[in-house]
Image (cartoon, helix red, strand yellow):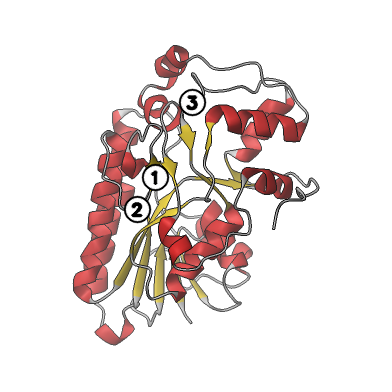
Amino acid sequence: MRIGLTGATGFIGGHFARVACRPGEVVAYTRGTRSPARAAEMLRQPPEAPHALPETRLDALVHLSGESLMGLWTPSKRERIWKSRVDFTEALVRHLATWRPENRPGVLVCASGAGYYGDGGDGKIDETSPQGGGFLAELCGRWEAAARGAEALGLRVVLLRTGMVLGADGGALPLLRRVFGLGLGGRLGNGRQWQSWIHVEDAARLIRFAIDTEAVRGPLNLSAPEPVTNSEFTRMLALALHRPAFCHAPAFALRLLLRGLAEEMLLTGQRATPGVALAAGYRFAFPDLDSALADLLGLPRPASAP
């Protein structure tokens, strides 16, 4: 198996290469002057294509690269986010069209986001739920449409609608751990917004499951079976860290300081469930937040965990 991987030096990409792939399976594609050395360090092999995707035989291509969503959503930031996802994916598909058919990957697994659904309120969301509104929903919709262009080339396309990925070495958890450790943790706004989340190990293994399972195609919610509200997440993290969580951030302050980022990523959410993954037979190592936090924080695993 030869698996091309864009975003190989990123949080999820690095875990995918280490956790879900055997040595020599990954062909790492990176961007930036420092990325090739970092990719070599993480993958324990030299990246074959540090700045481009030259034609080579691939069985699968996992496309995870993109500008970080964190930071103020200024016009220039939004443009970078859009270009690094929509425009880059369109160019990637056009590039694959120039490859000989026998060299093209059989499956393209492309990142997207649970933001596709917009503000889902309290209703449960699965992969059949409609597209929502807002910048993130429009971004994800166009991003997925760009990836679906590969279907015309004969590729099976899987779209990863990713929730909050929890890991000890990346994502939001290290920052949250520091904030809660200082006694400054608390809910965001009223705390009633839902958070779909997934342990990074399950995220990595579910991507590999999507590659290996022919029945998986189209949208795939990359989220654990038990989403929680922001208040519940706050309570459980504070309990696990044995720290208070009284410093909640008022909605008006978040909107004032972070503008669009706050409204679409912090104060609203999605009660997303992994219907496609469960129907296809994937078994989560960390289906509930208690077991995920215990693993990531080095705590005894709850007795009820599998």
Residue at 28% x, 51% y is: 143
Residue position for label 3: 192
In the figure, 146 relative to 78: above or below? below
Say which mark, if any, is on residue 106.
none
Q: Is residue 56 left or right of residue 241?
A: left
Measure the C-alpha gap from mark 3 to mark 1: 17 Å
- The reply to whether residue 14 is visible in this rendering is no
What residue does disc 1 label?
114
Residue 127's disc is: 2
Kind of residue at badge 1: Ala
User: As displayed, is residue 237 above or below residue 25?
Assistant: above
Mark 3: amino acid: Arg
Who's the residue at 28% across and 74% down the image? 155
Residue kind at label 2, given as amino acid type? Glu
Q: Tell me the SS state at disc 1.
A: helix
Marks 1/2: CA–CA distance:
10 Å
User: Given the current orientation, which residue lies at the most extreme bottom position?
Assistant: 102
The quarter of the image holding the C terminus is bottom right
Q: Position of residue 182 (x, y in %)?
A: 73, 23
